[in-house]
Amino acid sequence: MPDTASESLVAKLVFAGPVGAGKTTAIRSVTDSEPISTEMTLSEPAMGEKTTTTVALDFSAATLDDGTPLLVYGLPGQERFAHMRPIVLEGAFGVVVVLDGSAIDIADQCEHWLREIRAHRAGMPMVIGITHTDAVAEFSLGPVRAAIRRCGAPVPTFTFDARDREQVAHLVRALLVTME
């Protein structure tokens, strides 16, 4: 609770996941302004149409229905920027892990990100959102569910379109429900 009337609550939410999963797009969809982004040209070959990647963080803000400011951050997906993760995760109330449903190694990526976040913030509430499932002939949540079981505590998992504000907001609401 704030100590004085001049103080107000601020909520911090983090989007995490591998390069190209849709973190920046999801942040752009759910916030009130264009994200401040540290996008740089990929050092590896382009990933389809994706030619840039986040190197430090993405940041934008929104206002919740009750007037609370929501600060939204995106973690860089490349391992060489892993040092930013504990810095950005500090003070967050939860994490939306964004995974690319068309990735062949989606189960490994899921396990990696769940373990990575828990290593920095044990007990951090999380949900998983899986993008690009339309690019897979027969997408199955089976491998992702198996990866979640290997990591311990269950994590709510959804498919979604990172470009759709309502679908991204649904993930955030699911995260909030897990905290109740």
Image (spheres, grey):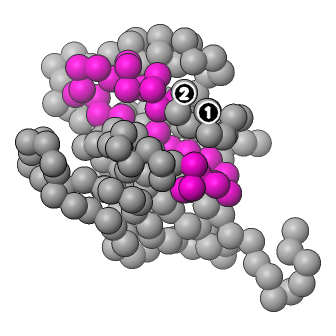
Front residue (pair 97, 122): 122
Residue 41 in the image, given as x and y percentages of width and height: 16, 58
Which quadrant does the N terminus fall into?
Answer: bottom right
Picture layout, residue 148 above or below residue 71: above
Would you say residue 47 sits in the magenta stretch? Answer: no
Instruction: Assign a secondary structure to mark 1.
Output: helix
Q: In the drawing, does residue 84 fall left or right of residue 106?
A: right
Residue type, numbered disc 1: Arg
Q: Residue at x 35, y 44 (%)?
A: 80
Density class for disc 1 (Cα within 10 Å; few <14, some 14-19, many ≥20) is some
Q: Which residue is mark 2?
A: 115
Picture layout, residue 52 above or below residue 4: above
Whether the residues at callouts 1 and 2 have beta carbons within 8 Å, the answer is yes
Residue 38, image quadrant: bottom left
Residue 36 in the image, given as x and y percentages of width and height: 37, 72
Q: Residue at x 33, y 23 (%)?
A: 106
Instruction: Assign a secondary structure to mark 2.
Output: helix
- Is residue 179 visible in the rendered image? The answer is yes
Q: Residue at x 86, y 86 (%)?
A: 5
Front residue (pair 111, 40): 40
In the image, the segment drawn in magenta is 86-114
- Is residue 160 visible in the rendered image? The answer is no
Q: Residue at x 61, y 61 (%)?
A: 12
> Disc number at residue 118?
1
Q: Which residue is at the far bottom?
A: 6
The alpha-carbon separation of the residues under discs 1 and 2 comes to: 5 Å
Front residue (pair 109, 180): 109
